Image: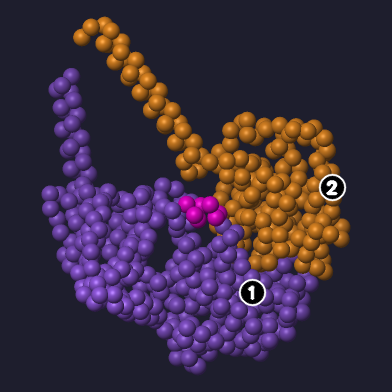
Chain colours: A purple, B orange
Amino acid sequence: MLVFMKNRLIFLILFILIGDCLFPLSINVRTFDHQNHTRLVFEGDNSFGFKINNFKNSIEIEINKIANIKNRITRIDDSKLIDRVVHSTKNNKSTLTVYFKSKFKVKRNFVLEKPFRVVFDVVKSEEPDRDLEPSENKRGKQEPKESNIKDETSKKKAIEIICIDPGHGGSDLGAVGRLKLMEKDITLKVSRKVKKIIESKLGLRVITTRDKDVEVSLDSRAAMANNQKAQVFVSIHVNSSFRGSARGPETYYVSLKATDQEAFKLAEKENSSLGEAFKTAENDDLKMILWNMAQSEYIKESSKLASFIQNELNILMHTKNRGVKQAPFRVLMRTAMPAVLIEIAFISNFYEEKSLMDDSFLDKVANAIYTGISKFIYFYNNI
Amino acid sequence: MNKKKIYFLIAIAFVFFIIVLIIFFKSSCYSGKKDLELSKEEVQEKVEQIKPVKVKMFFLQRNSRYMKPFSYEIGIFKTRQDVYKAFINELLKSREDCITPIPEGLKLRSVFYVKKRKILIVDFNEVLLNKFPVGTSSELEFIYYFVDNICYNFKEIKEVKFLVSGNEYKTISGHIDIENPFYPDYRYLRDE
């Protein structure tokens, strides 16, 4: 019996060792500066066990096996908060140490799957530095710390990149009118016009999620905007209703109310404490809730952007009834920036379909959208 | 070791085994998608009073963006699930003077209520994806036609989730996220 157990144990150890050699873990480190926080992502090609040690100016992640990481020291030049990530190995374990440029606080953290990712959202700490605490404090003098820190953290980057998303495309025709006009063609035309006007009048960089008649998934559109670090996302669509009489433009921004609030709270709770939070997102529900939170930080800005654009469209089309609305749009939920979806007009309304066939009308629509966006940019850059 | 000690150890081991079993089954009841599974008793929960079920249904109007109420009696049922099924089938019927925001040929496959989460899961056939007239307003009209009517009439239901042929889909026609359940939005109901 003892011999049998011993053999089994040796076999198990060999199996683990061979497994580790055959499938070495490689980890990719990414950072991204959002408006209110910096996101730090450790992406592994396999899942891995880890332990977190939190220090004053660094976070240490102890991985339970040796990981392949390109460089021993990865400098993060374009991050506001993160200085470098250092990789070291000891006792068949890898350790990744993230050094920060200043004192930091982990705002939330979670694990995502497929691919396996350990995510930290960090902010600059507003706590006074005890080591550098001025002696005047003890004498009762007002400390200037809060205003100094706020000045630095609240400094927003002026808007430089805008993402325009022409709805539908390829085999996804979108809505089709009685005169056989297709939504995918109108959205592409208007998006091209808006891009041209913004580039020529504002000199900003405009990226589009498609520039020809191809199908792009909703999640890829949001990912494109996030990866390109767009600061404004405008999705252009044409509406259709079961009621033939429905008319007028509408501008939407995301509503989180329509999603599972309890689950949303659960996700928040999961992320609230460092010790509790590093649990694998075991089901897709939680993974998606965490994704959905991407837009939750920008609701106020998105609502403002929607009103600026809707006001311009109302003036153009003399509409009063229709306005800014909220709905859980798939494409907006996953964008990490102010994001809106515009429904230019109803293709299901015979008269509006006719207008949509007129190129000069589309020019006016593009101009109205441009004016709305430029008003938002002025507002955003000056608050 | 005497016999008494052995029996004592066996008894402790047995109790420990039972506790582990209880913990295992309890935790599996609360995990992830198990929440959405139904026990037979839940589905077959009897309606307390066997009498015609009175409901108020709201329908879309051709020249108004508000839904107008109509009162109906939808029959006598033995189980709660049958009531929900009959109610949704009633919503699927076309009506003169009103708009039914559903594609032609749409059928209800099944419906089940998850008591623990107060969610009604409504499963339609594939017509919902294949023949739906694409458009944001069409999607919203469809979704809230069902969600508002269901939640208005059955207070025990707080949210409604849609499935197509038993599967989850991201959207109906490329706009509204239907992976999550919906709370009612009564802005378009006009209770006269």
Residue A186, given in percent of the width and then of the height, sits at 62, 78
Farthest-out residue, front: A139
Secondary element type, mark 2: strand
Can residue B99 be seen at all in this image of the molecule?
A: no
Can residue A62 be seen at all in this image of the molecule?
A: yes
The answer to if A97 sits in the magenta stretch is: no
Q: Nearer the viewer, residue A156 or A309?
A: A156
Q: Nearer the viewer, residue A283 or A38?
A: A38
Residue A343, given in percent of the width and then of the height, sits at 64, 74
The answer to if A261 sits in the magenta stretch is: yes
Q: Is residue A123 left or right of residue A101?
A: right
Quadrant of the image containing the C terminus of chain B: bottom right
Identify the residue shown where x is 50% and y is 43%. B33
- Neighbor class of circle 2 (other Cα within 10 Å; few <14, some 14-19, many 20+) is some
Looking at the image, is B118 positioned above or below residue A6? below
Q: Nearer the viewer, residue A191 or B20?
A: B20
Farthest-out residue, bottom: A201
Farthest-out residue, left: A91
Question: Bounds of the magenta span?
Answer: A260-266
Identify the residue shown where x is 18% and y is 25%. A5
Residue B115, given in percent of the width and then of the height, sits at 61, 40
Residue underneath mark 1: A324
Residue A347, given in percent of the width and then of the height, sits at 70, 74
Tag on residue B72?
2
Secondary element type, mark 1: strand
Identify residue type, mark 1.
Answer: Val
